[in-house]
Image (spheres, grey):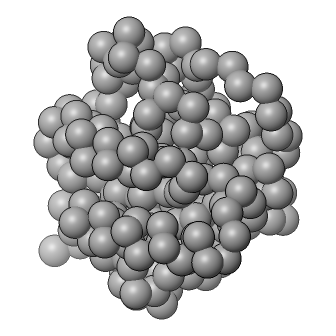
Amino acid sequence: MLDKAPNDRQILKLPPAYMPSSTPYAGPDFRPEVKSACISNRLITTGLKISKVIVLGNVAVGKSCLVNRFCHSVFDQNYKATIGVDFEVERFDVLQVPFNLQIWDTAGQERFKCIASSYYRGAHAIVVVFDLTNLYSLSSCPAWLEDALKANTVRPLVFLVGTKRDLLSEAAYKHVEDQATRMARALQAEYWCVSSKLGLNVDRFFNRIAALTFNMSVLQECQEIGQSKEIGSGLVSKSK
């Protein structure tokens, strides 16, 4: 593991939502309990090093392009179907605490669905992807989310992401955006629009996921365990 995350993956303040009016995750910054656990004597709650993110959606909507743009800074216009599941781990420093984002890029083809769905369990975030130029792919999003939620006893964070923004004019995009934001509200999801080809909003989006999953996990640890643990040591302090 790197001693330190790259500068663009060091997060000291909660990155804003793409549209403040289209997110169920309100709040301008990390929760005070989370900041206190991380900053006060470099303490953090136990067991938090990795958050799991699963990326779902119809075939050819741009799931792999989105992941590859973020993880490898590349865009391949020649479509290659994902077989089963691809897997990436990306390093962040959130509030100066080392943190890994585990990204599972799942296949959209029906014949691989049973394989991909076996990886849904234990997700901290679900990213449901659709193609902004194909409204049928948007209508499929509730079914993808339902399958993922069935595999998780605790509801993960949910994001609805429209890809290929570069292929739409401003007027055409506005029409799609109205439908997408309505769908996001129905799914209780945070809406984002991206272009993997141009890199538009891609880094912002994944930084937002990393920060929100980190915030959620530390908060749960603070509430459920009632203890904090110094990073890199076996000393645990319990509070009443």
Q: Is residue 50 above or below residue 108?
A: below
Evaluate whether residue 223 shows in this view.
yes
Above or below, 233 relative to 93: above
Nearer-the-camera pick, 137 or 239: 137
Number of dots carrying numbers: 0
- Quadrant of residue 194 within the rendered picture: bottom right
Name the quarter where the C terminus is drawn: bottom left
Residue in the picture at 58% in, 65% down:
193
Viewport quadrant of the N terminus: top right
- Residue 14 at least partly seen: no
Depth check, front residue: 204 or 107? 107
- Does residue 85 appear to the left or right of 66 in the view shown? left
Residue 133 is left or right of residue 114, and the answer is right
From the top left corner, tell me how far across and down residue 67 is, in percent: 65, 41
> Which percent across, then down, holds residue 120?
33, 31
**Is residue 225 depicted above or below 68 in this figure?**
below
> What residue is shown at x 19% (from left), y 61% (from top)?
224
The residue lying at 36 percent from left, 17 percent from top is 110
Answer left or right for 113 relative to 143. right
Given residues 137 and 73, the one toward you in this image is 137
In the figure, is residue 144 to the left or right of 90?
left
The percent position of residue 128, horizontal first and vertical second, equals 41, 47
Whole-percent x, y for residue 90 in the image: 67, 43
Residue at figure coordinates x 55%, y 12% from the top left: 83
Task: State whether residue 64 is above or below residue 206.
Answer: above
